[in-house]
Amino acid sequence: MRKIILIAMSISLTFVSFSQEKQKKETQKGHTDHNKFRQMKDVLATPNDQRTASGAPGHQYTQQKVDYIMDIRLEESTNKIYGDEEITYHNNSKDVLDYLWVQLDQNMRADDSKTPLTKPSKNVSAYLTPKNFKSTYLKEGKGFGFNIEEVKTNGRPLKYFINRTMMRVDLPSPLKPGAKFKFRIKWNYKINNSVKDGGRSGFEDFPDGNKNYTIAQFFPRLAVYDNVEGWQNMQFWGRSEWALEFGDYDVKITVPADHIMEASGELQNERNVLTKEQRKRYEKARNSFKDPVLIVTQEEAEKNEKGSTTKTKTWHFKADMVRDFAFATSRKYIWDAMAVNINGKTVMATSLYPKEGNPLWEKHSTRVVANTLEEYSKITFDYPYPKAVSVHAKRQGMEYPMICFNYGRPNEDGTYSDRVKYGMIGVITHEVGHNFFPMIVNSDERQWTWMDEGLNSFVEMLAEEDYDPKHPLRGLPKKIVRYMGGDQSNLSPIMSQGDYVKQFGPNAYTKPAAGLYMLRHTIMGPELFDHAFRTYSKRWMFKHPTPSDFFRSMEDASAMDLDWFWRGWFYTTDVTDIGIKSVKPLYLTDKPSERVSKLKKQYKQYFDNLGDLVYITDKKEEANPKAMDKYVDAGTEIPSYIYAVEFEKPGGLVMPLIVELTYADGTTEKQTFPAQIWMKNDKSVKRVFSSTKEIKSIVVDPNLETADVDLSNNSWPKKQTNKFEDFKNKTKG
């Protein structure tokens, strides 16, 4: 070895010396590795003892805990809510804390909010309604936002500072690791009309003066402190949602005595707030696993809504290990419930809705809740909470632990279209599904919207398909083609902080969902995907995962290198476009080509050692179908048809190459080549197909599995279609 190396060095030095005598050549430039299959070590967070390289929580993983004891009073006559909350903050981290950050989400709609100033002005209209004129030019104050009455600990005032939607509470002394701090906040605010003023929480008023209150983000809530962000105290601008800590809630809510209510947690005082008949019906519902049981009928609700009272009633709920709390209350509610068997444990599926929701809600809502709990539990983990509630709200679709607010209202005469029905089924499935992501697998919604909306939209499709196979699934790969087929230069990758994402719906919901659908059905297969997805879900139950934890867990539990997929689909706006560049028929022959003849002469000994040879030609006149006959056993079918196919990839994404061959007799054959076929050449690859039957056509991605944005190059012979047909092909289904 040493002698060979010396000879090589001698030759190299001689060459260099010789080159220097000639005119100096231009130095060649290198390049950075941009191969689509390079590993993601440059973008994923460095593993540590809190978050491992496998994607699992590390042996030093910690997270904070925050417990709340609250007394809430809703004043219907003024639409105001008053709160007195005692907060116990547990510092489970290894850090010493000098202050706490509290979220004041209602300040987003305060009169001095900066949120409206972030939105560009729309085109100036030639005319305005008086209402629009007042809101646009008179800057009419509405009096929304938190009024903080006091912040105290042990009866002594605490120093605090409010920065828009965040409040810093300065601690009287540093809070050491393992210690806890207890303090109290008293507050009130004016409730917004969620139909007229907008918002994820608020009330809807009806012509008869009744209201439907769906109340959330209604109390000062502690922000997350972790080893990834420190304090997650990014401002709430109205779109990107929340990062919250788990804790135990003990909540008493005082409302008009004729209201019916549901909330996060288990009701503690049934005897005080429900009639004997209502308790009897609810007990029946606890044993009804097939159909919902009406606890408050429509007739009873209609009678109840005709009156009102100044008397009050206090409902008491407790919820353990939840990250938030919400409630709904009205005298208009119809109430039904049924039991769901989750691996031997009974969970209650429940719905509240005014008569305006019927007959659609009575027929579907609670059944959809039950189906969602069953289907999500199959692919993630057994639903751990005692109930899940769907509440009808005219223009809301929002989720909270054990309770969600959902739209989907029939016409006044009770009729409804399939669009309204499937829209309602979809939103209920989606919002109930959020119990899993992010209410339990508790990702940071303010940073990574796709980690809850995208994952949830994917599982939502599986649940909707189970409930009704005719349900139009919006997250299928072919449904994202219209979005991805447009100009991508000004759009955001999925891995973008939620507030600056453009095309929020496709980017945060349907594109991640379509990607996961491709992983399950096309790239990994359901069995392998489901195991990996379940592994991630169970690892991060009641914890705070990051994108790195998800990507790593999926690979760790599947033995599949998916870095090419994460990098392309999540970190870029590249698109899929794979097609057929050329198809060349080949033929068996016993005559070597001119090139092979020259090689045989040049390397005679090599070819002599090979013995007899059979050749392939692209010239039909040189074909000899019997060239192989003497080399095979009698009766063996020899492929008479051989095709050299070159596939091209104008798109930036790599994807599996899915090829469907249709033979002259009408039969078909499908072959799937893994994405790694593009490893050595990102632009084109060649494959040879042989058969005893003539191939009449070849189609790439026949079932539209890979979100291919251009189908004009997917077929051989090329199909003659017009632009309208191309558009239909991209978006059909």
Image: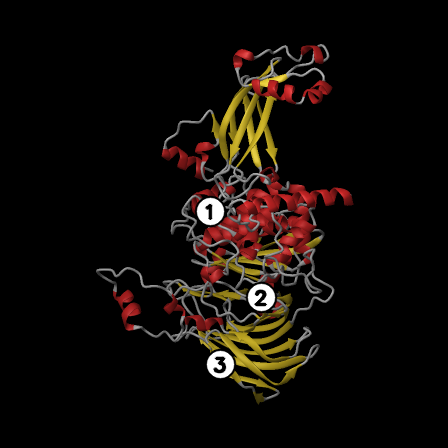
Label at residue 421: 1
Q: Which mark is residue 233?
A: none
> What residue is shown at x 65% (from left), y 54% (from top)?
552
| Amino acid under disc 1 | Lys
Q: Kindly report the distance in space between the C-alpha atoms of the residues bearing marks 1 and 3.
A: 42 Å
Residue closest to the eye, 100 or 417: 100
Give coordinates of residue 351: x percent, y percent. Answer: 54, 56
Q: Earlier in the sequence, mark 2 or mark 1?
A: 2
Residue marked by disc 3: 148
Hey, which quadrant is residue 157 in on the image?
bottom right
Q: Earlier in the sequence, mark 3 or mark 2?
A: 3
Q: How is the image coloured?
A: secondary structure
The residue mark sitting in front, 1 or 3, is 3
**Which residue appears farthest toward the front when viewing the image?**
21
Q: Amino acid at mark 2?
A: Leu
Comparing 622 with 342, the one in front is 622
Position in image of residue 330 (x %, y %): 48, 65
Asked whether disc 2 touches disc 1, contact meaning CB atoms under 8 Å apart, the reply is: no
Which residue corresponds to mark 2?
274
> In this image, 70 relative to 5: left or right?
left
Residue 306 in percent (x, y) is at 42, 64
Amino acid at dot 3: Ile
For numbered disc 3, what is the local secondary structure? strand
Q: Is residue 201 depicted above or below 53 in this figure? A: below
- Quadrant of the rendering where the N terminus is positioned: top right
Which is more foreground, mark 3 or mark 2? 3
Q: Residue furthest left?
A: 126
Looking at marks 1 and 3 on the same chain, the residue that comes earlier in the sequence is marked by 3
